[in-house]
Image: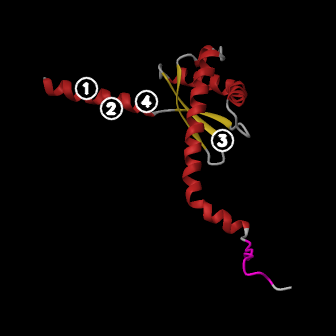
Amino acid sequence: MARSAITPKTTYTSASKRAGSRSTGGNSQMKHRIGRVETQIQREVDDILLKDVNDPRVKGVTITGVKLTGDLQHATIFYSILDDAPDKVEAAQTGLDKASGLIRREVGQRIRLFKVPEIEFAQDKSVQYGARIDQLINEVRRNNLE
């Protein structure tokens, strides 16, 4: 039987070639998704600390940012504290570490993710740095007025 001229020839493309053709836009889409998840985790953790964590050591803690790994498996949550005395910062870190299991569970219930990331808390020193810069600027202004 002769093959009809109308029948298209079927070509098969390997999975690696198909994946490679999509990789140009996929990276920016993944970065955008990571950014959205970071923002959502930040909002939820802030709310959880306010409403669900009763530890007095974490009162006055503000969540300033979240950094997720590319595979969404680990989250570093940055915080600042109003009283930056070393003993208060250490107490806040201990309280946050102790509450991390509760926080992770609550995040898992509030955000739809395949796997809830492991949570680690780190003090955000940029707030202290900014306050120090403001202090130095004010000192220079005072010296110029004298």
Distance between mark 1 and mark 3 Cα atoms: 40 Å
Mark 4–mark 2 Cα distance, whole angstroms, equals: 10 Å
- Residue wearing tag 3: 74
As drawn, 126 above or below 145: below
Q: CA distance from mark 3 to mark 4?
A: 23 Å
| Residue 133 image label | 2
At horizontal 61% and vertical 32% (from top left) the residue drawn is 41
Q: How is the image coloured?
A: secondary structure
Q: Which residue is under mark 4?
A: 127
Mark 3 or 4, nearer chain start: 3
Q: Tag 1 or tag 4, which sits nearer the N-term? A: 4
Would residue 7 appear left or right of 56 to someone viewing this image?
right
Q: Amino acid at mark 2?
A: Ile
Residue mark closest to the camera, 3 vs 4? 3
In the image, taking residue 133 as reference, residue 103 lies left or right, namely right
Q: Are marks 3 and 4 in contact (CB under 8 Å)?
A: no
Q: CA distance from mark 4 to mark 1?
A: 17 Å
Q: Residue furthest right?
A: 1
Local crowd at mark 3 within 10 Å, few (<14), some, or many (≥20)?
some
Q: CA distance from mark 1 to mark 2?
A: 9 Å
Q: Residue at x 61, y 13 (%)?
A: 56
The percent coordinates of residue 85 (x first, y second) are 48, 21
Dominant secondary structure, magenta: loop
Which of the two labelled residues, at mark 1 and mark 3, occupies the earlier sequence position?
3
Residue numbers of the magenta segment? 3-12
Among numbered discs 4 and 2, the one appearing first in the sequence: 4
Question: Is residue 119 placed above or below 85 in the rendered structure?
Answer: below
Task: Give the image quarter of residue 93.
Answer: top right
The one of 108 and 67 positioned closer to us in this rendering: 108
Q: Secondary structure at mark 3?
A: strand
The quadrant the N terminus occupies is bottom right
Q: Are marks 4 and 1 in contact (CB under 8 Å)?
A: no
